[in-house]
Amino acid sequence: METESWVKPELARMGGFTLSRVSQSHLLRLRLLDEKNFSCILYSCEALERAELQFLKAIEVASRGTPVMILAHQVPVAAFAKLREMKAVVALQRPYEKTVFMSTLEKMCRPNKRGACPRFMTNVSVGMVVIQSGLSMPTTMRNYSTHGAYLEYHGPSLMAGDRIQLKLGSSHSGAAKADQVLLEAKVVW
């Protein structure tokens, strides 16, 4: 992985980590996950596509819930829908700060703190419909994490507890429907 130059020294500084580099086929062939428990698994890839998600699902099952941190250049919106189904997975999209990586890794390796996930800055248009009224409002997603998102919109005020429907992904006429995700959400604040 491209971050290996600073990952290894940082993990050594934290103590208790061993870094080994293994390919997908080698990891499955070794049956390492059946024989040994790990604090965390780091998975590095260019883009988090269908094949990578299927592999990660197999890793989740084989490792019996070991936390997995994904380091990827591209995390398509459709991938986030699949990641939500995996309980112990956090994805970081490059570029990311070294401090974000290290604090996320530290939280993931402490079972009582796995719910804390970093937010990623973005500027993406999403479709938002208020379920109670059917009102559609142009919306911009300013940041997101695996547990929530900050949405900026112009229109009537929403209250905590209001239910909304979000359409994420490209809405261009040439975009595949698989590149779009439809989610129901609740306004938290």
Image (cartoon, rainbow, N blue to C red):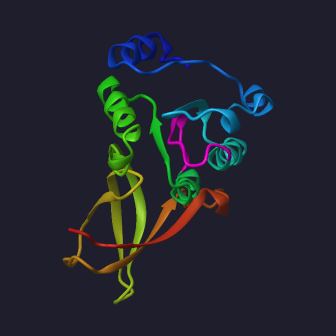
Q: Which quadrant of the structure image shows residue 156?
A: bottom left
Above or below: residue 132 compared with residue 136:
below
Which residue does the image show at 67% across and 41% down from the upper left? Answer: 52
For this orientation, the residue located farthest to the bottom is 133
Q: Position of residue 128 (x, y in %)?
A: 39, 71
66 inside magenta stretch? yes
Q: Which residues are magenta?
A: 62-76
Above or below: residue 140 compared with residue 45:
below
Between residues 139 and 26, which one lies in front from this camera angle? 26
Q: Quadrant of the N terminus?
A: top right
Is 157 positioned to the left or the right of 104 in the image?
left
Q: Which quadrant of the structure image shows residue 161?
A: bottom left
Above or below: residue 186 compared with residue 177:
below
Q: How many marks?
A: 0
Which residue does the image show at 69% across and 31% down from the upper left? Answer: 32
Is 145 positioned to the left or the right of 70 in the image?
left
Between residues 125 and 103, which one lies in front from this camera angle? 103
Is 171 positioned to the left or the right of 129 in the image?
right
Above or below: residue 8 compared with residue 113:
above
Which residue does the image show at 54% across and 53% down from the upper left? Answer: 83
Q: Position of residue 7 (x, y in %)?
A: 43, 17
Which residue does the image show at 48% across and 70% down from the upper left? Answer: 183
87 inside magenta stretch? no
Q: Position of residue 75 (x, y in %)?
A: 53, 43
Between residues 113 and 170, which one lies in front from this camera angle? 113
Is 161 positioned to the left or the right of 86 in the image?
left
Q: Quadrant of the C terminus?
A: bottom left
